[in-house]
Image (cartoon, grey):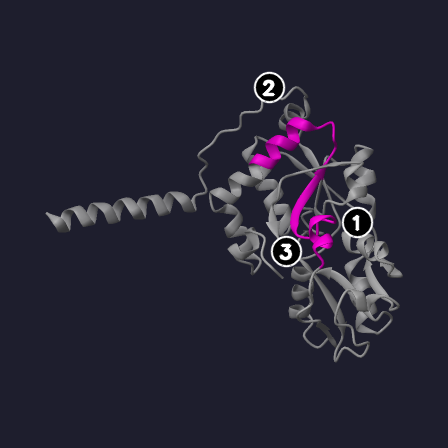
Amino acid sequence: MLRTVLAAVLAAVVSVSASAQEFQFEAPPLFDNCGDSSLARAKTEGVTLGFSPSPPYSSLDPATKKAGGLDIELVEAALKWAGVTTFKYEVMPFGQLIPALLAKRIDVVSANIHVTPDRLKAVSFSGPAWWYGPAIVVAKGNPAGITSFEGLKGKKVGAIAGSAADEYLRKIGVAVTAFQTDAEEFAAISTARVDAILDDDVKIIEFMKANGSTPIEIVANVAIPDELIFKYGYGYARYALRKDDCSLRVAFTQGLAEVRGNGQATAILKTYGLTNRNLFFFPL
């Protein structure tokens, strides 16, 4: 009898696990009374996602014109939960994404974008999607002797134009060399045209894995200023939408929560070498 009961329990557990792997949802979308038409329009007409190619976050296959990457997969999964099924893509430099959003060339900035004081004046943000943090990169051996954010002052420091890193560095008095693309930024630190760069730890680790012979390194054990995380938003990846598109933003935000809740976000993170550690805030 006991053996029969245990077998039944095991079968039930296996059944639940199998169902979870199909990424089913407990909650349906319920946003009909939000008051604006942005979600309804997105469900009938689709949305245009804007991004700047930046593996592993986002990329565009030149042959198929299909976008991919960690952020693209998360954004599409969340919007599909909300009933949006048609996606178009616009590729542009990072600094042009918010102007394109406001001009209605795109509907969602699907490059992960940090909440900053200046951006809050112009756009609204989704809820949190996943967590990562900033890292300082220097030439091998750290010839400039940089060991802290304060140590960046007086040095040549690179950042992506318009990024949270760019904005924060300027705020603390660092003279920033701004780059339009990741390739330009990494080339600059690799050839000692700048003393350091400040960028996303995940992006940097991905680059270093793919370019093992490049003479650069991450400065270890750097204390991250609280202001950089909690005022300049350098932590949770989020996505930007127009302030007027309230119902789309609310649906999208719940969609992000649902794909975190049903395991799909974990599966996507795993695809790109990350873990559940990247779902939640953790000290860097």
User: How far apart are labels 2 and 3 at the CA level?
Assistant: 34 Å
Position above or below: 255 against 142: above
Q: Left or right: 210 with respect to 170?
A: left
Q: Is residue 171 above or below residue 256?
A: below
Q: Give the foreground label among 2 and 1.
A: 2
Question: Which residue does the numbered mark 2 point to in the structure image?
Answer: 33
Residue 203: horizontal and vertical position, in percent? 68, 60
* Mark 1 element type: helix
Which residue type carries mark 2? Asn
Tell which circle, 2 or 1, labels the residue nearer the N-terminal end.
2
At label 3, the amino acid type is Tyr
Mark before the other along the chain sequence, 2 or 3: 2
Q: Secondary structure at mark 2?
A: loop
Judged by depth in the image, the label closer to the viewer, 3 or 1, is 3
> Pointer 1: what residue?
94
Where are the magenta residues, as a range? Answer: 225-254
- Give the x, y percent position of residue 83: 57, 30
As shown in the figure, which amino acid type bears the numbered disc 1? Answer: Phe
Identify the residue under disc 3. 132
Tell me the quadrant of the picture where the C terminus can be found: bottom right
Towards the viewer: 173 or 134 = 173
> Would you place residue 192 above or below residue 61 in this image?
below
Give the spatial CA distance, label 3 vs label 1: 18 Å
Can residue 187 be spotted in the picture?
no
Q: Residue 264, position in %: x, y? A: 50, 46
